[in-house]
Image (tube, rainbow, N blue to C red):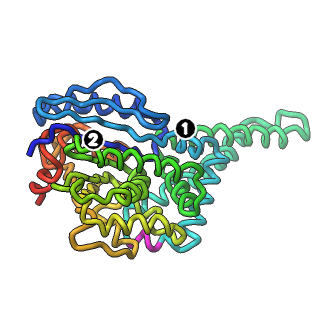
Amino acid sequence: MTVKQRQVFYIHGFDPRGPGHYHSLYRTQSARQSAVNGLDIAVSRRRRRSAHSHHWQLHTHHTRTDYCYLGWDDIIRRHWAKGWFDILGDLGCFLWAYVLSGRVIAFARASHKQLIAGFYPAIYILLSVVFSAWLAWQLPALLPWHALPTGAALPGQAALGLALFWLLMQGARRLGNRLAVFWLLRIYAFSAKWAKGGIPGLETRAARFADDIANAIRNTDNDEILVVAHSVGTMVVIPAMAAALARITDPALFANKRVVLITLGECIPLISFQPRAHEFRQALQQLGQDPRLLWLDYTAPTDGACFPLLDPVTSCGLNRAPNAGPHLLSPRFFTLYEAGHYKKLRRAWYTMHFLYLMAADKPGRYDYFAFTAGPRPIAQHLETQP
């Protein structure tokens, strides 16, 4: 079977960059991948479809794809801690929701890498405070304060120390942003707040995504409907996909595994493990019991920002039907890149989390651009997996 028309929906992760970034990323990376897979993809200009969705067309020799970016970056920007007060607020939220609650034990059992990633921001902040305070105490003491009039030395030394501490902490904040330290912290705090129902507008946005997905399923001109979610987007897609499937009763619309969900670098346990996330787990349970949906879950053991090869359904105590739920797969990045290039990528952990969306050096079983724009249906790609 050749897919002549495909509808793709893409839900991004916790990233304030908007549709322009992801359109540019797809255009440049698909062009690079063409040298690997021989798939020449013509990417159209980006157009706004609604307030929070943009789309562009993908054309190959056999297939036309409508690629729709479903955005929630405006919600992310409202929860994107910038100054130290906001960052410390997120740290307090993290410590309360994950550490003091004892929930950290469940995450440690699920993924040691996530445990390390979780404490990375806290350790960075602690070291920043200690190191800045030490320098702010030691450096002013080296100056010749004895030359000042009596009574002026101590206030002057204290004022200089405070100013130096402030400057050092600002430098630590900028470095932390470059190292994506606070990006992780923002995600943990956001997930904890979401579990408590504290994200205004997110439920409504997911409902709009569900409308778009359901309408695409009903459109019989589409040979395949592919919903792709990356990183924190894998959490957003759960209620959206569950609501969309609940609205479709005609079994013919799901023939030949026509409706597909691909989750990339999932971090679903960040909310599914939260005791108060009842509605989220209900939606997750629904997807784990629905055999109409073909669900592929790609995670890489080298991706420190995901839960690699962990079943998002059963890991939080839910049950999945034997013929439903996610197929747990690895993109096997080490087979897709030259050894020297891959060694450099391993050191760039933030980039590693985005490799799912990027071009490779060599052909392999995982090819994001063949999935989203190629002529083969996803079900056929799955047949080639080990």
Q: Is residue 82 above or below residue 268?
A: above
Question: Is residue 116 shown in magenta?
Answer: no
Residue 106 magenta-highlighted: yes
On screen, 41 above or below 165? above
- Give 218 or 343, whichever is nearer the viewer: 218
Residue 290 to residue 368: above or below: below
Name which residue type carries label 1: Arg
Residue 361 in sight from this viewpoint: no
Q: Disc 2 residue type?
A: Gln
User: Which residue in the structure is indicated by mark 2?
Assistant: 7
Report the label total: 2
Q: Position of residue 238 (x, y in %)?
A: 40, 58
Residue located 30% across and 72% down the image? 320
Q: Quick one: SS at disc 2?
A: strand
For image coordinates 54% across by 44% down, the residue present is 75
> Residue 265: where, in percent of width, then height?
33, 53
Pick the quarter of the image with the C terminus: bottom left
What's the residue at 34%, 58% (across, down)?
245
Q: Which residue is mark 1?
A: 174
Residue found at x 35% / y 68%: 313
Query: Which residue occupies the foreground of this view, 208 or 29?
Result: 208
Residue 17 seen in the current view: yes
Q: Secondary structure at mark 1?
A: helix
Specify the label residue 280 is tagged with. none
Q: Sort mark 1 into few (<14), some (14-19) or many (20+) by Cα contacts within 10 Å.
A: some
Q: How far apart are the two marked residues, 2 and 1, measured between alpha carbons?
A: 40 Å
Q: Earlier in the sequence, mark 2 or mark 1?
A: 2
Q: Write down the region rendered in magenta.
A: 105-109
Is the stretch drawn in magenta largely helix, strand or loop?
Answer: helix
Please provide percent x and percent y for residue 172.
57, 42
State if disc 1 and disc 2 touch (CB < 8 Å). Answer: no
Q: Is residue 50 left or right of residue 127?
A: left
